[in-house]
Image (cartoon, grey):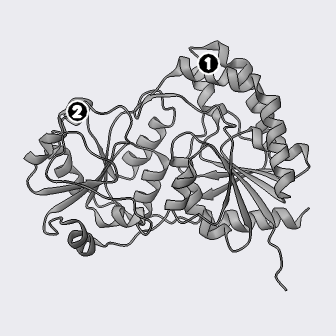
């Protein structure tokens, strides 16, 4: 006789794909123990491509998050406008979350990194656990200095975060802005480990395995003005990524996001990573000890913290925007090759799964 697994309502912020990537990293640790229902505004195709097709997806945009002008800049006035609208819709969204929890007979709730799913869990006396390396209260508190109209939004967020049964704090994380929600537990780093498949990829994609390889992740939103054709001047390098690159340089190889592609294998097969500095990129590079080349992102409150980690661990080089736009990368690529960052453990997946099971046992 099959024993029914407890149902986990896993609520994922739709702000970019970084929170979705964390779900992919956590999934192997949760799947043996839980029937997983995803509640998110992220596209279902993303999770299918990442091997999470067995999860049931419930489409809901419950998180105001941040509105971006492009891949590198947050639009604070637009973020404030969206946050106001979401606050006005709070009662209806809360009702919809409660409805979904009841429909799926949820046993507990995990939220990355929205506040409202925790309030809905509290209303049904379900364990509601927060997971993240920051909260939206952290982010908005920084914006409030220039835009005081964030104050009522912050107050509502803090009240909802206070309903959390616990907070799984991922490192590296943002701690200096707001008091954390209750029952804080440091769980370390969450990341996936890939395998170096340089020989296999060279044959599959026609890349030169004798050259240095740089994996590129600039995002695919608002960076069309970059002079990508100048990559061809870097004749000792092959560049590759999963998004088309401006200028279609001959030494840039577009990698299909096919069903059996494991993105961390691309990271492990490269010599250097060029990308926007976010939790997912940094954690993956810390896990396997890869040097990164990164650039400034504007109005991202976590940027300074992540840069500090990169500097302290001597694992990266910052490229200025003039060089990035013109793809004048010879100097920073050379500097990155002189770095030999150490690897760091990523134990959060196992710890979070154990903690969720313990939260169930206490009910």
- Identify which residue is drawn at 57% across, 22% down: 143
- Identify which residue is drawn at 44% across, 47% down: 309
Of 273 and 209, which appears nearest the observer?
A: 209
Q: Which badge, 1 or 2, comes first in the chain's sequence?
A: 1
Looking at the image, is 132 positioned above or below residue 175?
below
Residue 227 location in percent, x, y? 18, 35
User: Do tag 1 and tag 2 residues touch (Cβ < 8 Å)?
Assistant: no
Q: Quadrant of residue 48?
A: bottom right
Residue 163 in sight from this viewpoint = no
- Identify which residue is drawn at 18% across, 64% down: 207
Residue 198 location in percent, x, y? 26, 71
Quadrant into which the C terminus falls = bottom right
Q: Nearer the viewer, mark 1 or mark 2?
A: 1
Of 274 and 314, which appears nearest the observer?
A: 274
Say which element carries label 2. Answer: helix
How many neighbours does mark 2 have within 10 angstroms: few (below 14), some (14-19), or many (20 or more)? some
Q: Is residue 186 left or right of residue 343?
A: right
Residue 323 in sight from this viewpoint = yes
How many neighbours does mark 1 have within 10 angstroms: few (below 14), some (14-19), or many (20 or more)? some
Say which element carries label 1. Answer: helix
Q: Residue furthest bottom?
A: 1
Residue 71 location in percent, x, y? 40, 35
Quadrant into which the N terminus falls = bottom right
Q: CA distance from mark 1 to mark 2?
A: 31 Å
Q: Is residue 227 left or right of residue 84?
A: left
Residue indicated by mark 1: 81
Q: Which mark is residue 325?
A: 2
């Amino acid at each position: 006789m099959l024993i029914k697994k407890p149902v986990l309502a896993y609520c994922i912020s739709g702000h970019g794909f970084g929170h979705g990537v964390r779900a992919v990293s956590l999934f192997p640790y949760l799947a043996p123990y839980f029937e997983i229902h995803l509640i998110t505004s992220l596209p279902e195709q993303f999770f299918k491509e990442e091997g999470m097709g067995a999860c049931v997806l419930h489409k809901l945009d419950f998180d105001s998050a941040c509105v971006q002008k492009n891949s590198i800049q947050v639009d604070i006035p637009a973020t404030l406008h969206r946050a106001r609208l979401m606050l006005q819709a709070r009662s209806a969204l809360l009702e919809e979350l409660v409805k979904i929890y009841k429909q799926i007979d949820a046993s507990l709730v995990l939220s990355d990194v929205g506040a409202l799913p925790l309030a809905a869990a509290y209303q049904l006396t379900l364990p509601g656990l927060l997971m993240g390396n920051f909260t939206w209260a952290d982010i908005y508190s920084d914006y409030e200095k220039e835009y005081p109209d964030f104050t009522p939004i912050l107050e509502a967020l803090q009240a909802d975060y206070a309903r959390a049964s616990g907070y799984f704090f991922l490192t590296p994380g943002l701690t200096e802005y707001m008091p954390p929600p209750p029952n804080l537990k440091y769980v370390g780093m969450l990341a996936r480990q890939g395998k170096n498949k340089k020989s296999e990829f060279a044959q599959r994609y026609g890349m030169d395995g004798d050259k240095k390889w740089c994996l590129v992740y600039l995002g695919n939103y608002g960076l069309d003005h970059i002079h990508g054709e100048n990559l061809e001047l870097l004749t000792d390098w092959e560049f590759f990524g999963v998004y088309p690159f401006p200028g279609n340089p001959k030494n840039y190889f577009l990698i299909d996001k096919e069903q059996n592609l494991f993105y961390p294998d691309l990271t492990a097969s490269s010599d250097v990573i060029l990308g926007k500095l976010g939790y997912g990129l940094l954690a993956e590079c810390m896990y396997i000890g890869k040097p990164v080349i990164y650039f400034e992102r504007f109005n991202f409150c976590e940027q300074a913290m992540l840069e500090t980690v990169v500097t302290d661990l001597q694992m990266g080089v910052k490229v200025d925007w003039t060089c990035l736009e013109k793809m004048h990368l010879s100097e920073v690529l050379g500097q990155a090759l002189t770095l030999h960052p150490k690897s760091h453990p990523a134990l959060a997946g196992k710890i979070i799964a154990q903690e969720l099971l313990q939260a169930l046992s206490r009910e």
